[in-house]
Amino acid sequence: MSELTLSPLGKEATYVSRYAPELLFSIARKNNRDFFGVDVWRAFEVSWLEPKGKPVVAVAEFIFPCLSANIIESKSLKLYLNSFNGTCFDSLEMVSSTLVQDLSKAAGGEVQVNLQILSDMQQAKIDIPEGVCLDNLEVSCSVYQPDASLLSVGRPLVEEKLYSHLLKSNCPVTGQPDWATVEIVYQGQQIQHESLLQYIVSYRNHNEFHEQCVERMFMDILNRCKPQRLMICARYTRRGGLDINPFRSTHPVNFQAKRLFRQ
């Protein structure tokens, strides 16, 4: 039996409003992950009760190491966060420490948690990707499953920052579309821009989780184009109050999860 058949994905769910860490559902990551990176999740629907019963509303950022044993299924994380809605906590620090404990246990790795109460927040900054946008290139697209053979390189050695808003894949259980802006930064022989755009578009009918899509893309470019250094980040749009931002790199980087206009 596939572990996904046991997940809450695609099933009718009962929303629990009392703290319930058992709602978190873990999915084992793939093996042979020889890279650096993190998965940054942002949750925009986080709330709990003060001791006197008054609600607190916050935004949370969860940083999962890419080498943790598991990813957490997104619907289960949503259900888990909803279980805080009717639960009293003495302080922000208690909420944060509870999240760290539960998420780290489910992920099988140390998870960082950043909580910001909405009443204390300043206006959020919306960023735009850096570098060259590929989306206006004149290309023909007919492949809608990932195909590394679409990628090609030229002779010059370059350092480039490229991005595209055309990445789309699908949830492997529900079939719902996942939309993202993908950013690629590399050093090495120049990746032919048209071929890279065709490759990005080839994910359009592909069924895989966010993190797995980014890792597949990272390894395909690394193996096919052989850059000296490579960084890839996909900034997926929000679903159910959560956005997911997987980042993978050939080298350690202090990654900052910028919030883009679609997020």
Image: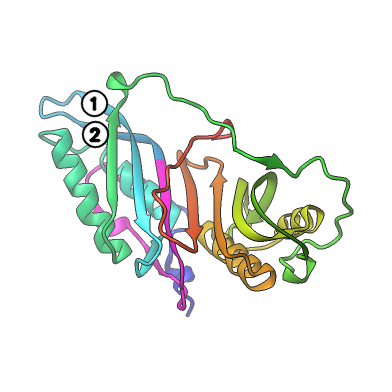
Three-letter amino acid code at the position of disc 2: Trp
The reply, left or right, for residue 244 in relation to residue 194 is left
What percent of the width, then of the height, locates residue 217? 62, 63
Residue drawn where x is 15% and y is 28% of the image: 50
Q: Which residue is mark 1?
A: 55
What percent of the width, then of the height, locates residue 176? 62, 52
Mark 2: few/some/many CA within 10 Å (<14, 14-19, 20+): many
The reply, left or right, for residue 138 in relation to residue 260 is right
Residue 110 position by quadrant:
bottom left
User: Do tag 1 and tag 2 residues touch (Cβ < 8 Å)?
Assistant: yes
Mark 1: few/some/many CA within 10 Å (<14, 14-19, 20+): some
Q: Nearer the viewer, residue 87 or 124?
A: 124
- Residue lying at the far front in this picture: please name it: 156
Element type at mark 2: strand
Examine the structure image and report whether residue 115 is included in the region drawn in magenta.
no
Three-letter amino acid code at the position of disc 1: Pro
Q: Relative to 6, is 210 above or below?
A: above
What percent of the width, then of the height, locates residue 39? 43, 54
Element type at mark 1: strand
What percent of the width, then of the height, locates residue 203? 70, 59
- Provide the residue span drawn in magenta: 16-42
Residue drawn where x is 58% and y is 61% of the image: 213
Residue drawn where x is 35% and y is 50% of the image: 63
Q: Nearer the viewer, residue 80 or 223?
A: 223
Q: Relative to 127, is 134 above or below?
A: below
Q: How far apart, in angstroms, are the residues tagged by discs 1 and 2? A: 6 Å
The reply, left or right, for residue 193 in relation to residue 140 is left
Q: Which residue is mark 2?
A: 48
Residue 61 position by quadrant:
top left
Number of disc labels: 2
